[in-house]
Amino acid sequence: MKLKSLAFACAMMAAGSSFAAGTVNIGGVAHQVVYFSGASAPDNFLNDIAEGVLTGITYYTAPNYRAYAGAANGVPGVTNGTRVLFIKRSAGGSVFGVNPVARAQRVKTIDVNNCTSGAGTKASPFSCAVVGTDPGEPNHAAANNAGLVIDFGVSDVEPAMFAGPLNTENDTPALSPDEVARMRVQPVNQLMMGLAATNTVPATTFFSRSTYGAMLNGQIATWDQVDPSLSGDVVVCRRVEGSGTQTAYNWFFGNFPCAANEGGFVEPARMTSSFGWKTAGSGTAADPYIIDPSAGYTVIENSSSGNVRSCMQAANNGTDYTFTSWDPEEQKTNTFKVPFSSTGPVKAIATLSLDSYTSTSGWSFRNLDGVGTYNAATQTPSANATGIFPSKENLIKGRYDFVVELSIQDRSVPVTNEQGDAIPAIAGVQKAFADDIVKRAGSPKFTGNFENTGVQVSTPNAFASLPQFFAGLTDANGSEVDGNGVRYADRFVSKFTREANTCSPLKFFGN
């Protein structure tokens, strides 16, 4: 069935806060809009968070968007029963939880009044359209852009890390120090990043930080340079610029932007570095540009972590991979195809956050400075594995340092955007939801399923709670230890923190 379409722009303007917050009518009932955008990491426990702050939920979805309409429940500062539409955007990743927040820019959003299928249930959400135009796309500044301004955003790293020229989306300018200062930034939890390789790469392959980084930046282009017993060209399935995962990758392997002023950083390779870059095609869906993997070293830039996983699976299986991505050469989004069927299975690497461990078809996480694979779901390494495993124990004890700290940010001052919309600092229902979600997302309930009586978080082994917030963790009865005498803090809370500064080494805090 086709549900009645409603222009979000009209609803927002009618609410008197043009394109920010405001209300939207759903079935004739006004709902306060709370728009949350950025990194996909919280998506693993988003349903549980939504079900903790809303009752009587109607569920909506679009590619890289989720929305929940219901009655507020148990959110400090919000009257129970207040009708709320809670939207989460993951399209574009972390930078869409940072730059558009500081600049109060309109971005694409899900239109919950323009849905064509589904029952509105958790099992069968309404499938809806996406409206609006994103920064960097043509006509973004037009007055009729039907996008909405984000209330608060989440990123894999703090906003200061999204620096030019490597960490901005669609080649847009990086935030200035004044723009960064517009935001209230709150650290949330710790998340491990991981080295990933296709199953075509033997488990006996040794990966050091320097070797892996050299493959990512194109200094090592063939596998015999990694291990003389191997052959073939290196394939890199990376994220687009502006992704939080890519920003973490640029920091850990290239020292950017931490060493930018000293000239000590290394740039990652881009798609344009591929030996088979644009050998045919025109960039349309019907005639995609061809990136020929048989020509040699190949780099593929993906717009989401899911796309990275698909890229890895296609490389491992030797099947063609078609995707859309920002074209840095033409300064627009184009369609590309990598015909892995012409080469057969190849050896590829990627960097992915550990919350991808439930979707490892065709690839696996590898150990840092060692050999072997690591199963994060069961917390077990492969036989004869060496090095530093991306385990929850190593995360908590500070042994594994490819770790970032998610942050949630909102506007603390009024901002006027390019359309002339006067966007106020976050307040009211929107601020109350932002504050409550910060607390929930950092809680061991979500980073470790500690006393979680709701739907269990699917990837707790990827996260740890921050010690500055959860030192001395106790259960509901006030006990610091479990039935085996093990401290809860030693199971769920990191002993180290970067204090929301990725360029800082992990510092011992204790718990």
Image (tube, helix red, strand yellow):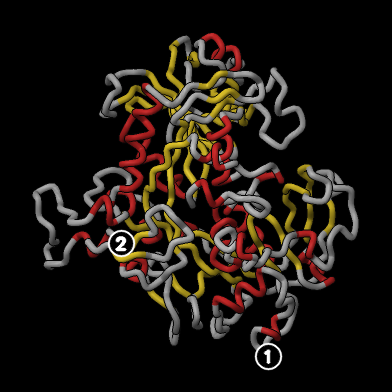
Q: Quadrant of the C terminus?
A: bottom left
Q: Amino acid at mark 1?
A: Pro
The percent position of residue 296, horizontal first and vertical second, equals 80, 73
Q: Which residue is mark 1?
A: 228
Picture residue at 58% right of the left edge, 49% below the top: 162
- Disc 2 on helix, strand or loop? loop
Regarding mark 1 in the picture, which secondary structure is present there? Answer: loop
Disc 2 crowd, CA 10 A, few/some/many (<14, 14-19, 20+): many
Circle nearer the N terminus (1, 2): 1
- Give the residue type at disc 2: Ser
Depth-wise, is mark 1 or mark 2 nearer the camera?
Answer: 2
The reply, left or right, for residue 52 in relation to residue 156 is left
Q: Residues within 10 Å of mark 1 (few under 14, many from 20)?
A: few
Q: Quadrant of the N terminus?
A: top right
Please identify the residue farthest to the bottom as the structure is shown.
229
Residue 322 vertical position relative to residue 170 in the rendered view, above or below: below
Q: Is residue 482 visible?
A: yes
**Residue 346 position by quadrant:** bottom right
Where in the figure is residue 342, as x and y percent of width and height?
82, 68
Q: Is residue 271 left or right of residue 509?
A: right
* Residue that appears at 60% across and 16% down: 9
Query: Where is residue 185 drawn, in percent x and y?
Result: 42, 42
Residue corresponding to mark 2? 494
Q: Which quadrant of the figure has residue 397?
A: bottom left
Judged from this view, the residue extending furthest toward the front is: 262
Q: Measuring from the top left, give residue 53's x and y in whole percent.
A: 32, 31
- Judged left or right of residue 485, residue 230 is right
Inspect this view and state whether residue 5 appears: no
At horizontal 46% and vertical 50% (from top left) the residue drawn is: 41
Against 76, is 18 above or below? above
Q: Are marks 1 and 2 in contact (CB under 8 Å)?
A: no
